[in-house]
Image (cartoon, rainbow, N blue to C red):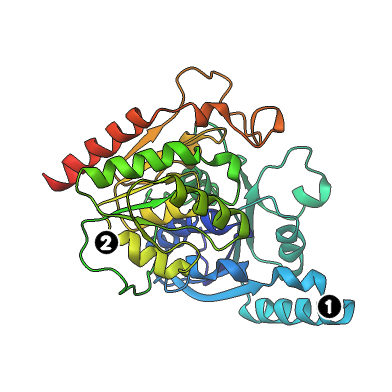
Amino acid sequence: MILPRRALIIKLRHHGDVLLSTPVFSALQQAVPSCEIDALIYSDTRPMLEGHPAIAQIHEIDRDWKRQSIPSQLAAEWRLFSALRERQYDWVIHLSIHPRGAWLTRLLRPQKAVAPHRLNEGRFWTGSFTHFYPAQSHPQRHTVESNLDALRALGLNPPSGPLVLNPGEFTKTRGDRFIHIHPTSRWLFKCWTVEKMARLADALIERGYPVVLTSAPTPREMEWMAALRSAMQKTALDFSGQLSLKELAALTARALLFVGVDSAPMHIAAAMGTPTVVLFGPSGDREWGPWQVPHRILVSKVHPCRPCGSDGCNHSKVSECLTTLSVEEVLAACEELLEKKTA
């Protein structure tokens, strides 16, 4: 097998998806140490890859390009293509079913190109790549393993290594004996109830553990956090909407425990090696659970319909399989991990 001199890995998805692709970069570097490995991602997800020791260059697509004038958009696309073409990639590894990966591969003309199988894939897709691997998000297979299948399809035998994230600095808290709770997601149907999360936070504080709260700065999540603060009887340190992703990583790296839902911050906690308690509702815990970190996953035992992948029961934005989880069982999972952490 002729090994690549330079390879491009494409992951045009959200923050958590990009973070779950980081073992692919590590595994390819380990298999082919002389290979220069570049990434193509959306610009807002850059913090997930910035500082990765296996990445030579990061190329970016700004989601706002499509809102610009046609000439400005075409100019941006041409600059991107010119930068990619100049690198003369031997391999292109496409880690999603985004159609951009197909036409870029045709234009870049690598020796080998791999992508996932798509449902109802047409000739344009099948003719764009030389190799294929099973589609991602298989309900019984973790997404990290699905990503690594791309390298397996190319004849490599990659190890299932850890997530890689280079954190920033965070100096607003002292010590490392706090519990980090990030209860929200961009998709609120993945969230527990405000009342139950408030009771959990109060119970942890009563047991002597300071609690630090975080969330994204979006209006919906900030509104959710305001309701949480109002429902709590105890006082927590609140950094909701104040932290960059790098700062969030540095914060959770110092925590005794992370508590949250299926979201990018949960994957960030796993990358930092922080024991994690996560509540799963309609999304699949086997494919999206914490990767290679001590954890406890809470799922409903009385809803055989999950994981359904729906945005709430009957698209109501409320997931009963999640909201019916009890405070007692989540608290017990927290205490179990805390006992092991402090033993």
Between 148 and 331, the one lying in front of the other is: 331
Helix, strand or loop at mark 1:
helix
Quadrant the C terminus occupies = top left
Residue occupied by mark 1:
74
Q: Residues within 10 Å of mark 2 (few under 14, many from 20)?
A: many
Determine the CA span between mark 2 and mark 1. Answer: 44 Å
Q: Amino acid at mark 2?
A: Arg
Q: Amino acid at mark 1?
A: Leu
- The relative height of residue 5 versus residue 215 in the rendered view (above or below) is below
Helix, strand or loop at mark 2:
loop
Between 141 and 181, the one lying in front of the other is: 181
Residue at coordinates 18% horizontally, 46% vertically from top-left? Answer: 341
Percent x, y of residue 174: 23, 68
**In the drawing, does residue 204 fall left or right of residue 58?**
left
- The relative height of residue 170 versus residue 82 in the rendered view (above or below) is above
Percent x, y of residue 144: 47, 47
Between 127 and 45, the one lying in front of the other is: 45
Q: In front of the other: label 2 or label 1?
A: 2
Q: Residue furthest right?
A: 70
Percent x, y of residue 166: 38, 69
Answer with mark 2 or mark 1, whichever residue precedes in sequence: 1
Residue occupied by mark 2:
254
Q: Is residue 211 visible?
A: yes
Percent x, y of residue 172: 32, 72
